[in-house]
Image: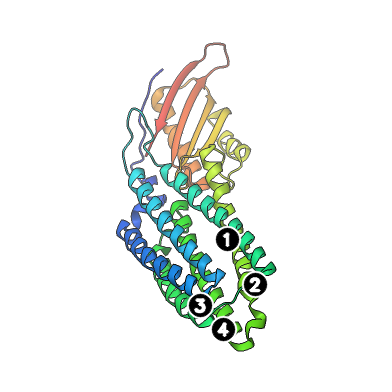
Amino acid sequence: MSHAHHDHGGHSHEGHSHSAKGIPKQRLLQALGISLIITAAQIIGGIISGSLALMSDALHTATDAVALLASFIAVKLGEKPGTPKHTFGLKRAEIVAAAMNAGVLIGISLWLLYEAAMRFIHPEEVKASWMIGVAFVGLVANIINAILLQKGAKDNINMRSAYLHVLSDAVVSVGVILGGVAIIVWGEGVKWIDPLLTVIISLWLIKESWGIVEESIRIIMMGTPPNIDVQEVADSIKGIAAVRDTHHVHIWSLNDQTIHFEAHIDVDDRLVSECNCLVDEIEDLLHDNYEITHVTLQFESGRCDSPTLIRVTDSH
């Protein structure tokens, strides 16, 4: 058995992957500071006004601070190189942070649904002017945070979970403002709108957060990316003239940017140098069609109990 490291001279596959490194970590810290200040203001405003929606906004902002801190730590851990104990590094720290952030959002949303139900049964007086004033301050702050975190949120699940936290707070703030305006215009007779808005916002948060939880679990459990059909990939490789068959095919995500591929490839008797040329062809096919950037191939020559094995590993 021999090992070889394969690299393309014409192009680098790393350039096709997205990384949280493109997002300045300072932005996470800036957003964290803003969240802490707004949390204090919203808690005070919620107590004075008696608004459940405003208190829910304060709780969401508080979880933002925790989420942003967790995301920052996860990015730092993900940048650490591999070690003998963690040969892939700690890249999945961001996946764990994303799952944690989304789980916290779901938990808080469920609690707020319960509190909203209690408010429907036992309505409380709400000071609309305080609702509007404090919620407006929170809205401005959350818009700033959303702008800070928007870059990379599409392609990085850790940043997406942090972005969802601040975006949800912005939505909550809009709801609180609309509720306060409604109470001022139509009076205390419509104070039920405060818990109603809380229910609507909480259900939306649960829906959005659950998608992140599902994706995080899939990655942690080494599931195949949903946009890739394993049989289709195997058939594509078998379509190469030099390949007789493929088996033991495994495709999984290391994190939400890096897809790994492993397979046994049946070929005719070939020299190692010829196999290297075949690796080029297979790797290009996997990269161009499925965005797979890390490939490990085990070549088998012949169909016997103890076949000759040539292993070629490509890691960018």
Secondary element at image label 3? helix
**Circle 4: residue type:** Val
- Residue identified by numbered label 4: 181
- Residue identified by numbered label 3: 131
The disc, 2 or 4, on the residue closer to the chain's N-terminal end is: 2
Extreme-right residue of the structure: 121
- Residue identified by numbered label 1: 205
137 relative to 231, above or below: below
Between circles 1 and 2, the one closer to the viewer is 2
**Circle 1: residue type:** Leu
Check contact, mark 1 vs mark 2: CB within 8 A: no
- Of 12 and 74, nearer the camera is 74
Q: Residues within 10 Å of mark 3 (few under 14, many from 20)?
A: many
Between circles 1 and 3, the one closer to the viewer is 3
**Circle 2: residue type:** Pro
- Of 83 and 62, nearer the camera is 62
Residue at mark 2 to residue at mark 3: CA–CA distance: 16 Å
The disc, 2 or 3, on the residue closer to the chain's N-terminal end is: 2
Where residue 144 is drawn, which disc sits there? Answer: none
- Residue identified by numbered label 2: 123
Secondary element at image label 2? loop
